[in-house]
Image (tube, coloured by chain):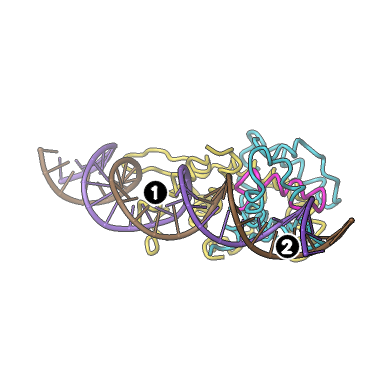
Chain colours: A yellow, B cyan, C purple, D brown
Amino acid sequence: MQDTLSQTFSALADPTRRAILSRLRRGEASVTQLAEPFLGQMTLPGVTKHLKVLEKAGLVTKGREAQWRPCTLNVEPLKDAAAWMEEYRAHMEASLDRLGEYLKTVTSPSAPELSPPTNNESTNDRNP
Amino acid sequence: MQDTLSQTFSALADPTRRAILSRLRRGEASVTQLAEPFLGQMTLPGVTKHLKVLEKAGLVTKGREAQWRPCTLNVEPLKDAAAWMEEYRAHMEASLDRLGEYLKTVTSPSAPELSPPTNNESTNDRNP
DNA sequence: TGGTTATTTAACCTTTAGGTAAAATATGCA
DNA sequence: TGCATATTTTACCTAAAGGTTAAATAACCA
């Protein structure tokens, strides 16, 4: 059994799983609903497995409602990951090549306001 | 071959590799120097392998200096990972349980100043 | 040339990850 | 009860991850 941070990063290291998380940002969804975008490339049990990984990592919570298992996003583990990244913030800002400036503007002035997600191309979580 | 984000997260999903990155924040180091803290638990070729993973992920650059291969940190891929996490920022701030408040204070007022790393327990990257 | 230090490669092993197909469960409804 | 829908479990496969030991390279130095 690995430590929590490793489990979190490991859960994030798969495009299908990231896409599932991204979908869940828009709200609760059943397994079938979550699976739908992938059924061309993967079977349902495949998606179930990914969901289990996310669940074990604490990133997704599965409820029960009749025969459905409504899944919800749980960002708690992401906070630890973000905190880990914080340590590298100075280095990231120091190397202002591609994304540096972008991140600086995005994260500093508009921080505390809970602003609505500027909705980038972020449904594009697969095949980036 | 996986996509870049997956490769980055996957590289971060190991405590030894995170510890190596953490060490490199303090500056360049040779393979032997990097390996030293782990030699009780792992052999040198083991560390070499981890370094190769980090190198392939673009997080570490290996130079050549006589028989040494000085390794340096490269945060470029971390920026993409951080950008991915940005999308979850609103959710993280909305759920202000454990780390929420901490992150809010850390990332918003002191953002653009390039402040020196507050040096937490962060050498403790292994066994957290 | 030969020895010493630094690092990598090769060959191997075991465990885990990501998939599948087919069968089993769970739940609502006629 | 029995069918329909939603989801999971089982058993299996292949490939990759993370290690190891032993041998090979690289580069300096006497």
Q: Residue at x 74, y 43 (%)?
A: B36
* Front residue of A105 and D30: D30
* Front residue of B67 and B77: B67
Q: Residue at x 43, y 40 (%)?
A: A62
Q: Position of residue A68 (x, y in %)?
A: 35, 43
Q: Position of residue B83 (x, y in %)?
A: 66, 57
Q: Residue at x 80, y 51 (%)?
A: A90
Q: Mark 2 is on which residue type?
A: Leu
Q: Which residues are magenta?
A: B11-31
Prevalent SS, magenta region? helix
The residue that disc 1 covers is A48
Q: Position of residue B85 (x, y in %)?
A: 63, 52
Chain that bears disc 2: A
Q: Is residue B84 above or below residue C15?
A: below
* Front residue of B79 and A2: A2
Q: Is residue A49 above or below residue B100?
A: below
Let me know if marks 1 and 2 both belong to one chain.
yes
Determine the CA span between mark 1 and mark 2: 34 Å
Q: Mark 1 is on which residue type?
A: Thr
Q: Position of residue C13 (x, y in %)?
A: 46, 47
The residue that disc 2 covers is A99
**A50 is within the stretch colored magenta:** no
Chain that bears disc 1: A
Whether residue B94 is visible:
yes
